[in-house]
Image: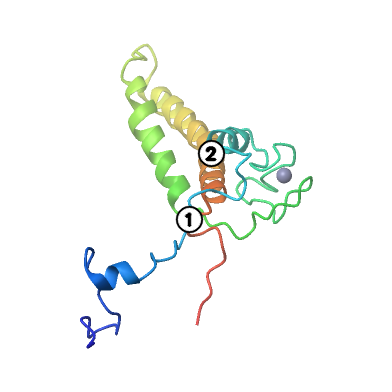
Amino acid sequence: MPDSDGESGAVQVVAGTIRASRNPPAPLIFSLMSEHTDVTLKTASLRALRGRCPCCGQGKLFRSYLKQVENCSVCDEAFGQIRADDAAPWLTIILVGHVFLPFAFMVNVDFLPTWAAMGLWATLFTAISLAVLPRAKALFIAILWQTRAPGYQPVELG
Ligand SMILES: [Zn+2]
């Protein structure tokens, strides 16, 4: 039978045909359940938000402000290769710019001189951003780890 898909060489199998009934179903590329079925996504996320290992909840997740540990010091689970990329700054901007910032308009600081009010808000929102950023990164590391999402494994180049 000629290939119906000339580009890839793959044969298109139409559901309901005799050919479809002869072929076994395609294997799942991603397993539907995590290997760590005892750790739910919620538990992993809450542990990470406290700065702890999503797997055991004991070891530290970060070795510095934003650098995660290569392996958990307690359970040896590997986190060094997980890439949260731009997700953490994205969530930080969403939270600080769209959730916390509106509160600044509800507080009256007219009694302060302009320079003091600007300094106050700049300091406050810098502090909130610095507090949210590592927690946002921890959250995405926990999600990538628990779901075994793309980014969990190191990418092979070349
Ligand atoms: Zn651990």
Amino acid type of the residue tagged 2 in the rendering: Leu
Query: In the image, 54: left or right of 148?
Result: right
Q: Which residue is mark 2?
A: 41
Crowd class of label 2 (few under 14; some 14 to 19; many from 20; radius 10 Å): many
Quadrant housing residue 4: bottom left
Give the distance between the C-alpha atoms of the residues marked 1 and 2, in whole angstroms. Answer: 20 Å
Quadrant housing residue 134: top right
Query: In the image, 24: left or right of 140?
Result: left
Where is 5 relative to 131, above or below?
below
Q: Which residue is mark 1?
A: 85
Where is 63 relative to 101, above or below?
below
Amino acid type of the residue tagged 1 in the rendering: Asp
Query: Residue at the spot x=44%, y=61% of the render?
Result: 28
Crowd class of label 1 (few under 14; some 14 to 19; many from 20; radius 10 Å): few
Q: Indicate how the structure is coloured in the image.
A: rainbow
x then y, percent, for residue 72: 73, 49
x then y, percent, for residue 1: 23, 87
